Image: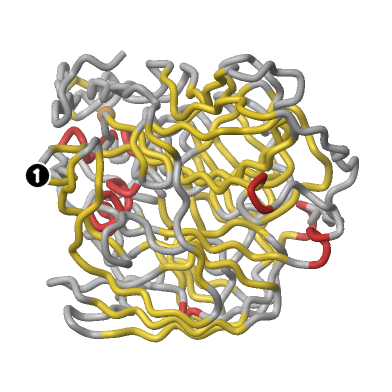
């Protein structure tokens, strides 16, 4: 599948039927937008997978222009440390207090959002809380939540997409006693995998979305894992724990193994599920995380197994049209392990939908945005929530502390996937109607991001507790977010 020289970039962006006449209102607008998918170009899976360095509770992250080796060439990227795309992986214990200094050596402002951490509003990386060019921001907070895989990335409004795409992101892993008691595969058998798509040229990672790429989200032709293009890793004939983040701006993956082996889902965005469940394929949207056990036992030495993304339906015009390999596992040694998958992973209390004191519905079907909602800028195509674009001076929802609410994301008339993410809280997914019509194996337990496909309406229950302040919630397609598909709630 290679044969194309490094630096060849194939982009989507052909637009056909850009405007169509709506039978309902007889006006011309953007139904029928036909952004084509950005096709993935595979490499030869000959580069050894590496892992970001680890960091503890005291650390300085220096946002900077640096270089990283991609496709054999050192190219300009953004990083939180020299000579690398991703920042270090933090690994902390529940109860730890962290003290992280962001030193902004970029020529523009930035900040850090700790995606998946429930921390005070002023530490959360709200788009108002910035480190100016040359400045600093000190993040100090106590980690008081269950074990899980969180991550961090910039959140300056209208610049998040570019800063993340060009390299700024990292993992934040929390351990606790409940998780430790399960004796899950650890050390060299626990593999954190950050999956991203990039547009790699000899001159850098290109980020210049056209209007139609803002609509579909910006996707790349090159899949990287932990910052490595087309990687492989050696594995032994035993259980592994894959801790997967979709750190892409817009691309949704339908993960599977090329030998059709089971993937045992044990965790998601905010830690362990109650029980494991075995699947053959599973969708992961930008911002979501998966904790997966894979057993390589029974494979002969030399066997090559790929983590792949399969085609999927109902993802709009730009998503799910192609199957491709993401990375290769090479079975390289024989080990007998005694690990058995625990039947019960965690004690999770279901929050009853009946405990909600109110329901808020958010219209996210942007294709039909002018029906029933005021358009504050005519027929201009923008991504909105309830017809509104982000405005940091406007509180959109006032929520009472220590109450439970049902939040409903209505994409029933939409034609694009929207992974909806709430800051400052965790939620449980109650129901999906339309589209897939049910919840996936990774949507039990606690989450912070939920994928709402075209045609779907997804209901979540959110315990708001006492973490008061002003927080954003938004679509985690970063082009949609930067385009304004983000609102604010005030918890008081
Ligand atoms: Cu990972 Cu507000 O986002
Ligand atoms: Cu219309
Ligand atoms: Cu979106």
Horizontally, residue 121 falls left or right of residue 144, namely left
Q: Decide which of 456, 211 is in the foreground and name it.
A: 211
- Image quadrant in which the C terminus is located: bottom right
Secondary structure type for disc 1 = loop
Q: Is residue 97 above or below residue 305?
A: below
Describe residue 374's horizontal placement relative to residue 257 as left or right. left
At x 83%, y 37%, the residue is 337
In percent of width and height, residue 381 lies at 20, 40
The one of 459 and 177 positioned closer to us in this rendering: 177
Q: How is the image coloured?
A: secondary structure
Determine the image quadrant of residue 427: bottom right
Q: Which residue is mark 1?
A: 203
Residue 109 % position (x, y): 20, 73
Residue 133 position, x and y percent, is 17, 78
Query: Residue, x 23% and y 59% (percent of image)?
Result: 78
Answer yes or no: is residue 483 visible.
Answer: no
Up-down relation of residue 362 to residue 223 (above or below): below
Ligand 3 position by quadrant: top left
| Residue 172 relative to residue 227: left or right | right
Which of 12/423 is in front?
12
Give the quadrant of the N terminus: top left
Q: Is residue 257 above or below residue 202?
A: above
């Amino acid at each position: 599948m290679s044969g194309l020289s490094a630096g060849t970039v194939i982009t989507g962006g052909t637009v056909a039927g850009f405007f169509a006449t709506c039978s309902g209102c007889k006006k011309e607008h953007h139904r029928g937008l036909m952004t084509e998918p950005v096709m993935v170009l595979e490499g030869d899976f000959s580069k050894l997978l590496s892992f970001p360095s680890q960091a503890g509770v005291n650390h300085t992250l220096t946002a900077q222009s640096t270089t990283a080796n991609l496709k054999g060439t050192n190219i300009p990227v953004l990083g939180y440390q020299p000579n690398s795309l991703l920042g270090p992986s933090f690994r902390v214990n529940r109860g730890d207090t962290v003290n992280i200094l962001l030193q902004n050596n970029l020529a523009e402002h930035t900040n850090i959002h700790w995606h998946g951490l429930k921390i005070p509003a002023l530490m959360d990386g709200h788009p108002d809380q910035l480190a100016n060019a040359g400045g600093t921001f000190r993040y100090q907070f106590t980690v008081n939540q269950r074990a899980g895989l969180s991550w961090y990335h910039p959140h300056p409004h209208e610049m998040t997409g570019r800063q993340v795409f060009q390299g700024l992101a990292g993992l934040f892993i929390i351990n606790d006693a409940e998780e430790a008691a399960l004796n899950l595969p650890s050390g060299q058998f626990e593999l954190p995998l950050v999956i991203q798509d990039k547009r790699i040229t000899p001159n850098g990672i290109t980020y210049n979305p056209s209007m139609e790429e803002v609509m579909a989200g910006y996707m790349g032709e090159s899949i990287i894992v932990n910052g490595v293009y087309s990687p492989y890793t050696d594995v032994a004939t035993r259980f592994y724990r894959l801790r997967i983040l979709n750190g892409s701006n817009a691309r949704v993956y339908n993960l599977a193994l090329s030998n059709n082996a089971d993937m045992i889902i044990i965790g998601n965005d905010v830690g362990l599920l109650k029980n494991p469940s075995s699947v053959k394929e599973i969708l992961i949207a930008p911002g979501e995380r998966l904790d997966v056990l894979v057993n390589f036992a029974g494979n002969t030495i030399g066997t090559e197994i790929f983590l792949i993304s399969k085609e999927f339906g109902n993802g709009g015009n730009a998503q799910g049209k192609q199957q491709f390999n993401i990375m290769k596992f090479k079975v390289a040694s024989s080990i007998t392990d005694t690990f058995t998958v625990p039947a019960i992973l965690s004690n999770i209390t279901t929050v009853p939908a009946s405990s909600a004191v109110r329901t808020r519905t958010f219209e996210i079907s942007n294709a039909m945005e002018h029906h029933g909602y005021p358009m504050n800028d005519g027929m201009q195509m923008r991504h909105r929530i309830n017809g509104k674009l982000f405005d940091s001076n406007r509180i959109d929802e006032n929520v009472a502390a220590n109450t439970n609410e049902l939040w409903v994301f209505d994409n029933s008339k939409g034609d694009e996937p929207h992974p909806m993410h709430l800051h400052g809280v965790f939620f449980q997914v109650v129901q999906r109607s339309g589209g897939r019509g049910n919840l996936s194996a990774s949507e039990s337990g606690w989450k912070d991001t939920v994928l709402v496909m075209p045609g779907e309406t997804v209901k979540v229950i959110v315990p708001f507790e006492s973490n008061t302040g002003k927080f954003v919630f938004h679509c985690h397609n970063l082009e949609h977010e930067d385009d304004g598909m983000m609102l604010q709630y005030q918890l008081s």
